[in-house]
Amino acid sequence: MKNNPPGAAERKPRILIVKLSAVGDVVHALPALHALRRHLPNAHIGWVAHPGPANLLEGHPEIDELILLPRRPSQYGGWKGFARLVRDLRSDKPGWDWAFDMQGLTKSGLVALISGARERVGFGDKNSRELNPLLINHRIPTISRQVIQKNIELLQPLGVPPDQPAEAILPCSPEDTDYVNRWLVNAGLLGQRLLVLDPFAGWETKLWPVGHWTALAATARDTLGLRPLIFHGPEERPRAAQLVEMIPGAVLPPETTLRQYVALLRQCAAAMVAADTGPMHIAASQGVPVVALYGPSDPDRNSPVFANARFTTLQDETQPCAGTFARKCPHHEPGQCMATLTPEMVSEALAGLLKAK
């Protein structure tokens, strides 16, 4: 970075974080944002994200500028839309000093390049994929295998210490909280603590058998006194409603944005059970006790090691697909990769977490 002439006011460094998706990946990058803001409190920090995950970043107290990138080129609105996106990335002068690519893909590398940042920083290992190594000009070797820590280590060129608590700030507005509280009042649940169950996932290899979910819900209700709430995304609501009908006393929450989901957790979540998904990582980052079920992903890399997290990870390492990150499994039928994790194992882990509270 250039030095200012004698007597000139020091210019705030302008730093762009490129972390486009998915929800869990964005949450994994929040501790890096917090570390960056603590180290450089006067910096101008921007973030480029896809719509959807970007909802978590709206109104974030540590972000000065949020730039939305359409998920697909067809959504840009033609060349005019693409030109408008370029202007959004480059409109503020004197421009970005640094762009930190925490996604490691061709698309994210192109965003960093288009931003005009003089220093484009990315991973110096296999986390820089596709054409990404050709689009960044600083490849940083990271030591940790854990993804949250790797994101913090990427900030080394700015002198950000890597050995600090992985704090993740997730804002929700008073309107978000009011929305949740109105639902709780109408449902007669205000003041109750619920067990949040998320039986859905974007990968078929991360699904736990339906019978296991119903058995776990019954055990948690009868032995722990926890009423189950079946969390879901917008497209999953019909299946969530079917599952609620199968579980006596289960609750179907209202449709929520991601920030309203954060409010929901804060208002009524006693604990959560889920696979390695974005909603699970959000819950762990907010201190909700979590039992995380791992099949094809790797808990050594993807566990929710946030500063205030309280979690237990379960994985059957004897399965041939364990830790392979396979979205489709050649060894199991869809939804069966984690079937050997029994409801009894999960309820025991849940009871242990709540007892240690």
Image: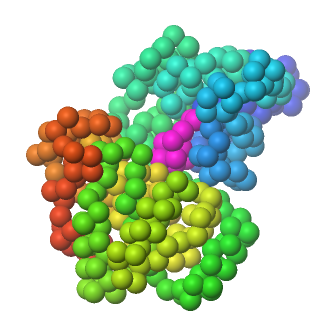
Residue 275 visible somewhere in the drawing? yes
In the figure, 62 relative to 320: above or below? below
Examine the residues drawn in magenta and state their main secondary structure. Answer: helix
Q: Please provide percent x and percent y for residue 192.
A: 49, 86
Q: Please provide percent x and percent y for residue 325.
A: 30, 36
Q: Which residues are magenta?
A: 19-32
Residue at image coords 40%, 56%: 200
36 or 325, which is in the foreground? 325
Residue 315 visible somewhere in the drawing? no
In the image, farthest residue toward the left: 318
| Side of 151 relative to 301 (left or right) | right
Please say which color scheme the image uses.
rainbow
Residue at image coords 72%, 27%: 76
Q: Please provide percent x and percent y for residue 266.
A: 55, 72
Q: Toward which corner of the image does residue 170 lie, by quadrant?
A: bottom right
Q: Please provide percent x and percent y for residue 53.
A: 59, 46
In the image, farthest residue toward the top: 134
Residue at image coords 64%, 17%: 113
Q: Toward which corner of the image does residue 121 lie, by quadrant?
A: top right
Residue at image coords 29%, 37%: 328
341 or 265, which is in the foreground? 341
In the figure, 350 relative to 164: above or below? below
Q: Toward which corner of the image does residue 123 lie, by quadrant?
A: top left
| Side of 318 relative to 290 (left or right) | left
Q: Which corner quadrant holds the C terminus?
A: bottom left
Q: Which corner quadrant holds the N terminus?
A: top right
| Side of 124 relative to 16 (left or right) | left
147 or 248, which is in the foreground? 248
